[in-house]
């Protein structure tokens, strides 16, 4: 439950940001990043709809690979 | 430990260290037991098959790393009863819907059963959805059954701090992870020699929170992320610390984790919630391990608004289903495949114990990743 997914910020409107990860877009709250300025184009780690920390693009790509593997394994075992 | 190596190089490094003459002399054919307290870590370890490739004298123990698994049975019971008997909408993270309570056969055992019998229960993936459902249904009370560790409870605190509609209530089952580790360490038989601390909990609360494991209990500790590299770096660090007798809190996830953590998130937690003694399913009361809404939010506290459903007596009914070893697995005293229900009558499709329900539960993770042999 504590996993965070890296997403790229596409647009910011006050505390809400439109974010994207691998073609999927979501509205994400920036309310917990008030001490850290974020801009469009930044990458953030998103957990249950909230950005919890900034991260670099390179780190985001590595994290996506790990989560892709986890999710594909989960899907394979859904039928069992 | 910020050295950049790939997973294979880290694995070699760890295993060579274990084979070194110094290590063999110090360990004298004993194993080193490393506990993780994060379901995400256990998933990464199992997915990468790390256990099979590590030196045989390294034991990786999955500890109390699943908020769904330790959510008290009486809280789930309360959520089910609220949803069945009050004119409300109950929302909860999807994992919570399948966790069974201990009631007679053919009774309503899960939130999913309650939903099937007509209760308005909706799985959500974010506290933001709880707020939206409350805004869309102003004539109804919406109760958010919010279980989770610090990483998940902080967004709920953020939601409350930002402002919530009058009709949004909370049945809060938030927990802090470090007091559970502290309790294990103070028990006198913790069952592990080193700790890998949870990366996303530390992202919120700061790595420093884990300093006590070293200063008070003299156990090697490293914070890890979720890649194989980060986990192996953490294993290398704690083994090295033990062999060298030079303990320090190592941050093997510096990409996200700082010593002090996310101060904004911590501020919102402090503003909206108190730290209280709290029950952990299968473990019991752990002092200072739970989040509860501050009194100023009492009109949003489902425990206060609907006191009839808080049945403390349920705590004595039997925390885990009969025959289920989830409590021992949560505490790292048994591996999942040492439970006699594992894979026989308890599987992800038809779970009996909470650790087989959640994606973060060690039993489900082991089964999902093909560990089908019974110990």
Image (tube, rainbow, N blue to C red):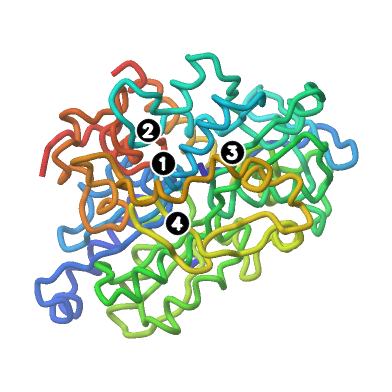
Mark 4 / mark 3, whichever is N-terminal = 3
Q: Which residue is mark 2?
A: B100
The tag on residue B279 is: 4
Q: Nearer the viewer, residue B301 or B257?
A: B301
Q: Are marks 1 and 3 on the same chain?
A: yes
Residue A10 x, y percent position in the rendering: 80, 32
Q: Are marks 4 and 1 on the same chain?
A: yes
- Mark 1 or 3: in front is 3
The tag on residue B199 is: none
Return the chain for callout 1: B
Residue B97 x, y percent position in the rendering: 48, 29
State the CA–CA distance, disc 2 to disc 3. 15 Å
User: In the rendered view, does B104 fall on the left or right side of B288?
Assistant: left
Mark 2 / mark 3, whichever is N-terminal = 2
User: In the rendered view, does B285 fall on the left or right side of B322?
Assistant: right
Q: Nearer the viewer, residue B317 or B156?
A: B317
Return the chain for callout 4: B
Q: Which residue is mark 3?
A: B145
Identified at 26% across, 28% down, the residue is B347
State the CA–CA distance, disc 4 to disc 2. 17 Å
Q: Which residue is mark 1?
A: B360
- Mark 2 or 1: in front is 2
- Callout 1 environment at 10 Å: few (<14), some (14 to 19), or many (20+)? many
State the CA–CA distance, disc 2 to disc 1. 16 Å
Q: Are marks 4 and 3 on the same chain?
A: yes
Mark 4 / mark 1, whichever is N-terminal = 4
């Amino acid at each position: 439950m504590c996993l965070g997914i890296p997403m790229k910020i596409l647009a910011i409107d006050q505390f809400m940001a439109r974010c994207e990860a691998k073609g999927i877009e979501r509205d994400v709250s920036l309310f917990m990043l008030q001490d850290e300025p974020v801009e469009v184009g930044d990458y953030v780690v998103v957990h249950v709809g909230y950005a919890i920390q900034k991260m670099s693009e390179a780190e985001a790509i590595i994290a996506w690979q790990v989560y892709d593997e986890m999710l594909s394994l989960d899907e394979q075992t859904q039928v069992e | 430990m910020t050295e950049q190596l790939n997973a294979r190089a880290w694995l070699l490094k760890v295993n060579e260290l274990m084979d070194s003459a110094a290590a063999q002399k110090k360990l004298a054919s004993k194993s080193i037991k490393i506990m993780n307290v994060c379901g995400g870590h256990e998933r990464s370890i199992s997915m990468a098959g790390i256990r099979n490739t590590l030196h045989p004298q390294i034991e990786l123990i999955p500890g109390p790393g699943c908020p769904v698994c330790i959510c008290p049975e009486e809280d789930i019971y309360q959520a089910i009863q609220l949803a069945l008997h009050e004119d409300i909408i109950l929302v909860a993270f999807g994992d919570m819907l399948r966790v069974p309570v201990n009631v007679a056969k053919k009774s309503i055992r899960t939130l999913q059963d309650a939903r099937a019998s007509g209760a308005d229960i909706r799985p959500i993936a974010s506290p933001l959805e709880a707020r939206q459902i409350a805004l869309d249904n102003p004539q109804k009370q919406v109760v958010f059954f919010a279980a989770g560790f610090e990483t998940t409870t902080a967004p709920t605190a953020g939601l409350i701090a930002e402002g919530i509609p009058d009709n949004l209530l909370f049945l809060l089952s938030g927990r802090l992870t470090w007091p559970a580790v502290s309790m294990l360490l103070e028990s006198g038989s913790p069952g592990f020699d080193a700790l890998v601390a949870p990366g996303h909990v530390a992202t919120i609360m700061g790595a420093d929170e884990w300093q006590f494991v070293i200063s008070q209990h003299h156990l090697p500790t490293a914070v890890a992320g979720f890649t194989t590299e980060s986990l192996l770096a953490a294993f290398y660090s704690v083994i090295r610390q033990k062999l060298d007798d030079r303990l320090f809190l190592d941050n093997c996830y510096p990409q996200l984790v700082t010593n002090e953590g996310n101060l904004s998130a911590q501020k919102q937690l402090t503003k909206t919630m108190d730290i209280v003694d709290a029950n952990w399913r299968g473990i019991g009361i752990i002092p200072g391990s739970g989040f509860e809404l501050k009194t100023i939010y009492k009109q949003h506290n489902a425990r206060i608004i609907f006191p009839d459903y808080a049945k403390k007596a349920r705590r004595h009914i039997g925390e885990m289903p009969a025959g289920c070893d989830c409590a021992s697995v949560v505490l790292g005293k048994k591996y999942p495949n040492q439970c006699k229900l594992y894979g026989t009558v308890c599987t992800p499709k038809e779970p009996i114990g909470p650790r087989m329900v959640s994606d973060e539960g060690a039993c489900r993770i082991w089964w999902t990743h093909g560990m089908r042999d019974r110990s």
